[in-house]
Amino acid sequence: MDAIKKTILIIFMLGVSPLINGQDESADSTFIRAIYDEVLGNGECHENLHYLCKEIGARLSGSEELGEAILWGESLLKKYNADNVVQQPVMVPKWTRGNYENAYFVSNKNMVRSRITALGGSVGTNGAVEAEVIEVKKLEDLEAIGKEKIEGKIVFFNRAMDPLLINTGNAYGGAYDQRSKGASEAAKYGAVGTLVRSLTHAQDTFPHTGAMSYLDDVPRIPAAAISTVDASALHHALIENPSLKYTMELSCTSYEDVEQANVIAEITGSEFPDEYIVVGGHLDSWDIGEGAHDDGAGIVQSIEVLRILKALNYQPRHTIRIVLFVNEENGNNGGKTYAAEAEKNNLIHFAAIESDAGGFSPRGFSFEATDDAYTNYKSIAPVLEDYGVHMSRRGWSGVDIRPLKNDYVTLIGLIPDTQRYFDFHHSKRDTWENVNKRELELGAGSMASLVYLLDQYRLGK
Ligand SMILES: [Zn+2]
């Protein structure tokens, strides 16, 4: 931390701030009730999500659609009378899926098609790849099987998300390495392609894409996700015929990075205008589906927070910043650029909230924060219990806001009910129809309420 920041922080610490045990519970209850009345009675986030999903649609980094979404977000925030609405330039990768992705194998003289989709960032197959398949459960299995048996084959990573974990995000995290690192790990043993069981609990025919990356020093081999139904079919076919031939074709291409932008809008603070509370989600999505839960929901909820506070004529003490981040899915350059610019300009962020776990019923918040901030939150949190917001835990906040992490900032992730999130995540099923209006609005209400509490009580200060 530089000297200026240190000085500013010391001033904050000496400054008079309301004590948490001085919470004005009745004022808080009244204002939070007004927030929920506004969002449930006059909410616009569901309609805004409709526009984002149906008029713009999927919006991968580098695409024209993301460019359109940036302009849409900017004009919507202006329409809601935000202060200082700006675009912050961000360099993002550009990758396209191309117009075909096919896979099949022949078993008992029948051609069996698999529903696959390229992982984001994969190379194309440059023609078709045809090879035998070796099925594994974990990256570590590759070493045990050895190069001799893997060379020239397609490695099929078929480890399911653990159904016993209650937190589906943890189940996702536990299966994630096959998708993110599988291709390069398999290429070290001479594999010519990889298939990854889709990261979902659903048993269906929709493949789920997602980010992967290559190591520099191994050949880049094509990588695709296969639907869970087709993964099971392949698994059974391999038991019957371990030397069956599998064919896959992917037409994806990578291009030079292009410039796009985060969108930033503010409600200027009255007492501490130079101290920021960020509220955000990510505007980019994968290129299949409509990016409705991931993360159109977080975007329209963040914008709704601003709309609600404006509608209630709330004058915040601190500057509230709504940030529509870009490139969360395949690079996080939006989050990294935002944090780097904040650092460069010595901006003090005392809190940031992200919604990026789906537009489902809110349950609570997850904190990366100092002990003081967390304890202070716990002491005032009961005021949210009537709204079903009763969970608080230490843990992951959000990909976009994470680069802001330092010793004093309070980073918070909205925790919705996530039991069905991975049914939709990164697949064609992530559409507007699958987001419930009321649940989406309750999420926005819980975020606006938290912003209000952070603003009133300077948690962590
Ligand atoms: Zn997301």
Image (spheres, rainbow, N blue to C red):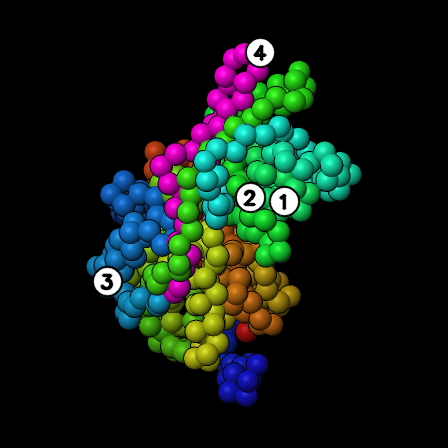
Separation of marks 3 and 1 at Cα, in angstroms: 49 Å
Residue 81 part of the magenta segment: no
Please say if the residues under marks 1 and 2 sit with CB atoms less than 8 Å apart: yes
Name which residue type carries label 4. Answer: Asn
Name which residue type carries label 3. Answer: Lys
Residue 187: mark? 1
**Secondary structure state at the residue bearing disc 4:** loop
**Secondary structure state at the residue bearing disc 2:** loop
Task: Find disc 2 in the rendering and name its residue.
Answer: 221
Q: Earlier in the sequence, mark 1 or mark 2?
A: 1
Task: Look at the image and give the residue range highlighted in magenta.
Answer: 90-117
Question: Which of 293/14 is in front?
Answer: 293
**Residue 207 in the image, given as x and y percentages of width and height:** 48, 32
Task: Find disc 3 in the rendering and name its residue.
Answer: 78
Q: Earlier in the sequence, mark 4 or mark 1?
A: 4
Q: Mark 3, mark 4: which one is toward the viewer?
A: 4
Q: Earlier in the sequence, mark 3 or mark 4?
A: 3
Q: Residue at x 66, y 30 (%)?
A: 135
**Secondary structure state at the residue bearing disc 3:** helix
Please say if the residues under marks 3 and 1 sit with CB atoms less than 8 Å apart: no
Which residue is at the far right?
Answer: 144
Question: Which of 85/311 is in front?
Answer: 85
**Residue 457 in the image, given as x and y percentages of width and height:** 49, 68
Above or below: residue 207 compared with residue 329: above
Separation of marks 4 and 1 at Cα, in angstroms: 30 Å
